[in-house]
Amino acid sequence: MSEVNLQTVLEAQKLAFRKGSPDIEKRKDSLKKLSLIIEENKDRLIEAVYQDFGLRSREETLFLEIFPLQDEIRHALKHLRDWTKRRYVRGAWFLLPSTAYYQYQPLGSVGIMGAWNYQVLLTLSPLIDAIAAGNHAILKPSEIAPASAEVLKEIINSNFPKEYIHCVTGDESLAKKFSALPFDHLFFTGSTKIGKLIMAAAAPNLTPVTLELGGKSPAIIHKSFSVEIAAKRIMAGKLFNAGQTCVAPDYVIIPQALNAKFELQVKKNVSRFYPNITQNEQYSHIINQDHYERLSSILIDAEEKGARIVELSDNTSMKDTLLTPKLVFNVSNDMELMQEEIFGPILPVLNLETIEEAVDYVNDKPKPLALYYFDNNEKRINWVLNNTLSGGVTLNDTVYHLAQHNLPFGGVGASGMGHYHGFDGFKTFSKKRAVMHQKRFAASDMLHPPFTGIKKKLIKIMGKLTRV
């Protein structure tokens, strides 16, 4: 789609919105239609994702993309009427008898840029929030996963009018034009590097942006916690989509004395999760050759700088873009795998002896999208929570905080800005509009100029009453 056509679609959406934004019933109907579309086309979507990756299991796409979308829609339908209610607040005493309230109103036409690693989920999940909030929307799935992008485009555009919801596909040049459009809000999921470019493109239009980025999410294991449980849960979260998940544990921090036990438990769990891994249809491939070569390169860099790389599968014969899981010990900060988000099935192990050292290390780095801490001691847990900052936290497990509909999901600092999911997604695509309703007779009428006589005395009294 050309730049002119993009602008035309946006103008048509804005014009349609001005003629009347979607009411609650239309929003509900649209969410139900989207749910039906997903259900009717789930096999096509699953096959397209498989095609994009070269191999990704049907069950993984169902569990990590289709099911969460349907559950998000169910949650939005259940709570939408309550979310849109007018909320009264206590008014200022000197403005009595006025009343004060706020209500959430849709912004207009919003842009949503999806991400290739979970193309279906990360394109349609923000759309659910945008529809619930009453907006019109234009979607731009990632060009890195073209098969799923085209299916999304077909099923959206054949079921919704262009002036309400529309999907466009194209290469990097289209993405640049898309991010520079004067949307009423722009939502982007992707890397920190590209997030900076998106924000810069949106700035001339003062378009507000939500950036869902990534980062190096640590998993810290206290020496008192069960290594067996921690290893199982860390590797389960790490190996979803072969590590190509924004909240995957990026590296582990443990005392050196736990290395051998951790290695043993990780090997056991990888064998249990993915037996005969090179022939296993439930273990995902890397998205493309470029990403495969990037991951291979950081392994070579680590080994050249003194790392010990542990192969975690029995069968290591490579094919296509399949990369088997690996642990990396003896890591140092000058290694590439400790400087950038890995986004693959490689797990560095950093040895630090105390929780204080671990927290200092994490705090010296850009703020991560997720933090995972394994401990059963409430005092230490609260200390870690109070002395770190990350987008989200899961205690004694990994990844699953993002599935909590009543919790916000989003980064902080280099890992992003803004939130979505549930009510927080509804708020992101809404304006929280303040309203004061004054009555026929108001105390404030007595404070109009000129300020003479009794008015001066009233202002002096007000000054005393408002002091702390």
Image: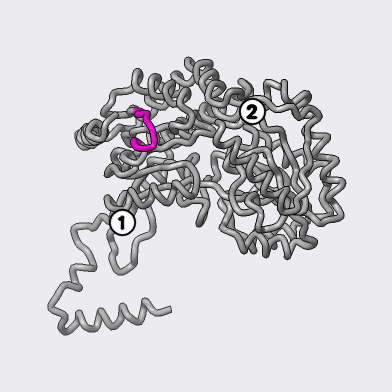
Label 1 sits on residue: 99
Using the numbered discs, state the Cα–Cα distance from disc 1 to disc 2 in whole angstroms.
Answer: 57 Å
Q: Provide the secondary structure element on which disc 1 rests.
A: strand
Q: Which residue is drawn at 17% across and 84% down?
A: 453
Of badges 1 and 2, nearer the viewer stands: 2
Q: Left or right of 196: which side holds 63?
A: right
Q: Indicate the quadrant containing the C terminus: top left, top right, bottom left or bottom right.
A: bottom left
User: Horizontal and vertical percent for residue 61?
Assistant: 58, 25
Whether residue 168 is in magenta: the answer is: yes
Q: Which of 131 and 14 is in front in this view?
A: 14
Dot 1 crowding, Cα within 10 Å, few <14, some 14–19, many 20+: some
Label 2 sits on residue: 284
User: Horizontal and vertical percent for residue 226?
Assistant: 83, 46
Q: Which colour scheme is used?
A: one colour
Whether residue 327 is in magenta: the answer is: no
Tell me the kind of residue under disc 2: Ser
Q: In which quarter of the image is residue 463?
A: bottom left
Q: Indicate the quadrant containing the N terminus: top left, top right, bottom left or bottom right.
A: top left
User: Horizontal and vertical percent for residue 358?
Assistant: 71, 60
Q: Left or right of 157: which side holds 222?
A: right
Tell me the kind of residue under disc 1: Thr
Q: Provide the secondary structure element on which disc 2 rests.
A: loop
Q: Which of marks 1 and 2 is nearer the N terminus?
A: 1
Q: In which quarter of the image is residue 4?
A: top left
Q: What stretch is highlighted in magenta?
A: 167-174
User: Horizontal and vertical percent for residue 100?
Assistant: 32, 56
Q: Residue at x 37, y 76 (%)?
A: 466
Q: Nearer the viewer, residue 257 or 336?
A: 336
Q: In the rendered image of this protein, does residue 336 appear above or below residue 80?
A: below
Q: Tell me if residue 241 can be seen.
A: yes
